[in-house]
Amino acid sequence: MKKLDFVKFGVGSLLVVLLVGGLIFGGGQSFAQEKIKIGSLMSLSGALASYGGPINNGCLLAAKHINDAGGILGKEVQIVTRDTKTDPTSGVDAARKLIDIDGVSAFVGALSSGVSMPVAESVAIPNEIVQISPASTTPQMTSLEDDDYVFRTVVSDEYQGVILGQLALDRGYETISVLYVNNAYGQGLANASTEWFEKQGGEVYTKVPYEKGKASYRGELSQATSKKPDALILIGYPENGSTIIRQAISEGFIDEFLFVDGLKSPELIENVGAQYLEGTYGTTPGSKETPSLGTFNQEYEKEFGKAPPKPFMTNAYDAVVIIALAMQRAGDTSSQAIRDNLREVSNEPGEKIYAGVDEFKKALALLEEGKEINYQGAGSVVSLNKAGDVVSPILIWKIEGGDIKSVRTENTVIVDGEIVPEKVVEK
């Protein structure tokens, strides 16, 4: 073989190898070398550690679907995850690292409202970085002076609180007390639920805050149950919730509870004992039945195994999706471009787009043609209002036979500026 022919053969072979390698190792997609990074600010340790992994899986699944659909602006989307430790100081530090070290222009998180609020005020807002929480439900987030950089794909506790208060009435309770974790999440949900309960004629004996990480909550339990309420609404997380419930039951304080999303955890049942929690009800932000929800459930099981009965995985998926689609629509990955296009890809008008690879291919093609899209999420329809909030149904759940089972979803409506349960209006 002539030297020139050998060189030609070698170069050609190298190109073939690179092309084949790109198909094998790139999942069939040809991406530019640079990746688009989206941050994931998760509770991988601390009070919400049992939730962090599954919720982060929602982010990873969204990125996989987007990449399998062709990526964003010809590039692969990469999720960069950092741990908040469910702690405000650690959360702020992790958020700063996402921006300063990892170079993200948007991030999903945090989970706890008590972490998301300081992260927003100390990191996202001053640095003009888009923050979308999939799980922080405090009403305080609605009124943040954020220059439209802080959003969430989960409904505010103003809505969950009303349904929680109504659930107490539906269960036949005439008197309640509330024991709540002393942060923005606990305070907001305690206030919203008791306000509705009292408006409908119920009596609230007391609302008692508690601090995380204590070995004993006997003092708080004594204060909350001294007047013998019909039930105790417990607002918190599995780590401390288990301690509170065990002490409440074993020492005879109370054994009738209502729970919330922060306690919707198999680990709580395991730690307390299923026999002690049988028949206990709770509330959590739910999902509107759309094709996206069915696709998410199927794809999550395929990728990670059966989805645990925990909230907010779908909301994290939706947050990554709308960030990515906003980048695609803008033709730009800057935080301002994302901010300015989030509502354009998730609100009406526009052709409805659902979760999954085929739907995302369709979305990218429509955006390429200059057409508008309206993403219908797995967790909610993701119609972002002026405050960056969404509205979704509230799920009623129950502990039965040692498992967490969905009972029904309930909607809220606005009547004369007030949030009320839809079923109350129908009556």
Image (cartoon, rainbow, N blue to C red):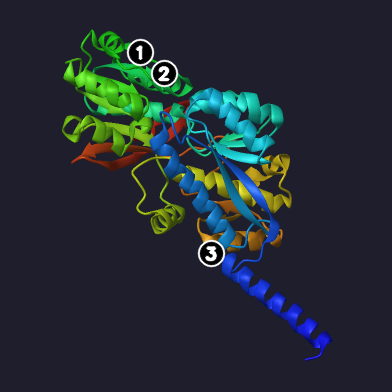
Cα distance, mark 3 to mark 1? 49 Å
Cα distance, mark 1 to mark 2? 9 Å
Q: Position of residue 11 (x, y in %)?
A: 76, 78
Q: Position of residue 27 (x, y in %)?
A: 56, 66
Number of numbered discs overlaid on the protein picture: 3
At x 38%, y 20%, the residue is 213
Graded by Cα atoms within 10 Å as few (under 14), some (14 to 19) or many (20 or more), the crowding at tag 3 reads some
Q: Which mark is residue 191?
A: 2
Between 187 and 34, the one lying in front of the other is 34
Kind of residue indicated by mark 2 = Asn
Cα distance, mark 2 to mark 3? 43 Å
Q: Position of residue 232 (x, y in %)?
A: 27, 20
Between 357 and 163, the one lying in front of the other is 357
Mark 1 element type: strand
The answer to whether residue 378 is visible is: yes
Which mark sits nearer the N-terminus, 2 or 3? Answer: 2
Between 204 and 378, the one lying in front of the other is 378
- Reading the image, the residue beneath label 1 is 207
Work out which quarter of the rendered image holds the C terminus and state it: top left
Which mark sits nearer the N-terminus, 1 or 2? Answer: 2
Establish if 232 lies above or below 1: above
Instruction: Check whether the beta carbons of the residues at disc 1 and disc 2 lie within 8 A of each other.
Output: yes
Work out which quarter of the rendered image holds the N terminus and state it: bottom right
Say whether residue 204 is left or right of residue 418.
Answer: left
Which mark sits nearer the N-terminus, 3 or 1? Answer: 1
At x 41%, y 23%, the residue is 189
Kind of residue indicated by mark 1 = Lys
At x 19%, y 22%, the residue is 255
To which quarter of the image does residue 423 belong?
top left
- Reading the image, the residue beneath label 3 is 358
